[in-house]
Image (cartoon, helix red, strand yellow):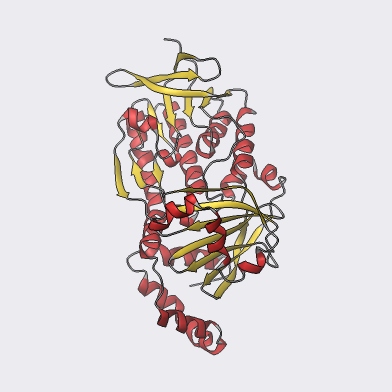
């Protein structure tokens, strides 16, 4: 049995490529396998909720050089009223075919990292106790071969075959709640500053993400019974979007680039993180609804945690103990965002006519806000007792604006 790598990574997108960068820095011999060809798009929120990981991976300069606008503000609409504020730091919203390629280029810049595209993993190679490698089908040459390594990483997405073959158990599951659609639009009339826009309207959630100049990603979470109709008649996507405040005129000179893409919804779960000779990463280990835009950030966090575990393994630690520690630390970091997301998507409802009327009147009355703002912190803390992470996240952001106890 010939060992061909220290680590085999199955899946070359954000999770797999970021781990390959970190392992490449450690001098590891890494082989990344992916059945796709690159550059290519994939279903995604596109939203880099934090840039610190991108900076630590050494690709922030390359991402910024691709011409993306720095998004500095957030605006939330409820019907025809909105609330807007600055972000504590800017974010970037790249197309996945560009961003994934930047990460891959960085990974293979390390001499020990090799990328094999068109390589479909068809099974794990294992004995009764231990995963030893993978069986690979070369889709270009039409042949199959075995590849061996002490560790196989499944970064192959929410429907991970590595997880299935390894028998990884799921827990904390919630069924998909909302279908999601999105498309790239050219020449949407912009706001004064690049701003993430969220539309809460009739039980639907709209997202407008500024990308490179003149291009925006428009996303839409709809009601479950609307999926089939919109999938059959994508023009309805734009019709719904035009019903949002200000969007009819802002879309007047716009055009859709490519097609509207969609899914019936993302599964929500945690999976067992690994076992003897294998581990899961990214959506393979944890998946949730995209409405809170945390997916890529979660993948990066897992990559950094797993790289630390692999380093400790090199230093003589027990893999079985270390992978359990990885799972514990992963879940501790990701459970707050998971609870926030589940609460958000399960509690989203259409506002009553009375609530809408009152909010519209309040939004337009500065005297109301003068009275309400001093009480908002206590009000939020009281109404988020079941999910204290909500108040905690606001408090954390407020510190960047000078908040003090």
Any part of residue 275 in sight? no
Indicate the quadrant where residue 59 lies: top right
| Residue positioned 48% across, 28% down in the render | 9
Above or below, comparing residue 83 to residue 146 in the picture: below
Whole-percent x, y for residue 222 in the image: 45, 59
| Residue positioned 36% across, 29% down in the render | 319
Whole-percent x, y for residue 342 in the image: 37, 57
For the N terminus, the quadrant is top left
Residue located farthest toward the bottom when viewing the structure as drawn: 367
What is the tally of numbered marks visible in this picture? 0
Any part of residue 173 in sight? yes
| Residue positioned 62% across, 34% down in the render | 39
Foreground residue among 280 and 110: 280
Left or right of 396, for residue 249: right
Above or below, comparing residue 363 to residue 130 in the picture: below
Whole-percent x, y for residue 18 in the image: 54, 37
Foreground residue among 69 and 140: 140
Whole-percent x, y for residue 329 in the image: 38, 45
Above or below, comparing residue 236 to residue 382 in the picture: above
């Amino acid at each position: 049995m010939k060992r061909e790598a220290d680590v085999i990574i199955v899946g070359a997108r954000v999770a797999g490529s970021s781990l390959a960068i970190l392992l490449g820095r450690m001098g590891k011999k890494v082989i990344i396998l992916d059945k796709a060809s690159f550059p290519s798009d994939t279903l995604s929120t596109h939203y880099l909720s934090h840039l610190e990981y991108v900076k630590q991976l050494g690709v922030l300069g390359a991402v910024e050089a691709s011409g993306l606008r720095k998004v500095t503000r957030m605006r939330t609409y409820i019907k025809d009223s909105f609330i807007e504020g600055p972000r504590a730091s800017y974010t970037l919203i790249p197309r996945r075919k560009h961003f994934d390629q930047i990460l891959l280029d960085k990974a293979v810049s390390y001499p020990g990292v090799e990328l094999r595209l068109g390589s479909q993993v068809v099974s794990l190679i294992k004995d009764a106790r231990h995963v030893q490698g993978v069986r690979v089908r070369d889709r270009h040459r039409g042949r199959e071969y075995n590849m061996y390594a002490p560790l196989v990483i499944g970064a192959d997405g929410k429907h991970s075959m590595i997880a299935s073959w390894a028998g990884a158990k799921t827990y904390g599951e919630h069924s998909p709640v909302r279908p999601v659609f999105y498309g790239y639009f050219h020449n949407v009339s912009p706001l004064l500053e690049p701003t993430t826009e969220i539309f809460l309207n009739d039980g639907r959630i709209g997202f407008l993400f500024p990308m490179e100049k003149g291009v925006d990603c428009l996303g839409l979470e709809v009601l479950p019974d609307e999926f089939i109709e919109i999938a059959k008649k994508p023009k309805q996507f734009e019709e719904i979007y035009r019903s949002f405040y200000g969007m009819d005129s802002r879309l007047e000179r716009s055009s859709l680039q490519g097609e509207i893409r969609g899914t019936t919804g993302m599964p929500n779960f945690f999976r067992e993180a690994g076992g003897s000779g294998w581990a899961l990463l990214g959506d393979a280990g944890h998946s949730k609804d995209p409405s809170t835009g945390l997916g890529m950030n979660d993948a990066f966090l897992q990559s950094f945690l797993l790289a630390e575990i692999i380093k400790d393994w090199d230093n003589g630690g027990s893999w079985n103990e270390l992978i359990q520690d990885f799972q514990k630390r992963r879940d501790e970091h990701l459970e707050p965002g998971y609870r926030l997301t589940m609460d958000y998507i399960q509690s989203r409802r259409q506002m009553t006519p009375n609530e809408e009327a009152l909010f519209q009147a309040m939004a337009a009355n500065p005297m109301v806000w003068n009275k309400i703002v001093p009480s908002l912190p206590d009000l939020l803390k009281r109404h988020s007792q079941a999910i204290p992470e909500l108040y905690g996240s606001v408090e954390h952001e407020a510190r960047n604006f000078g908040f003090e106890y």
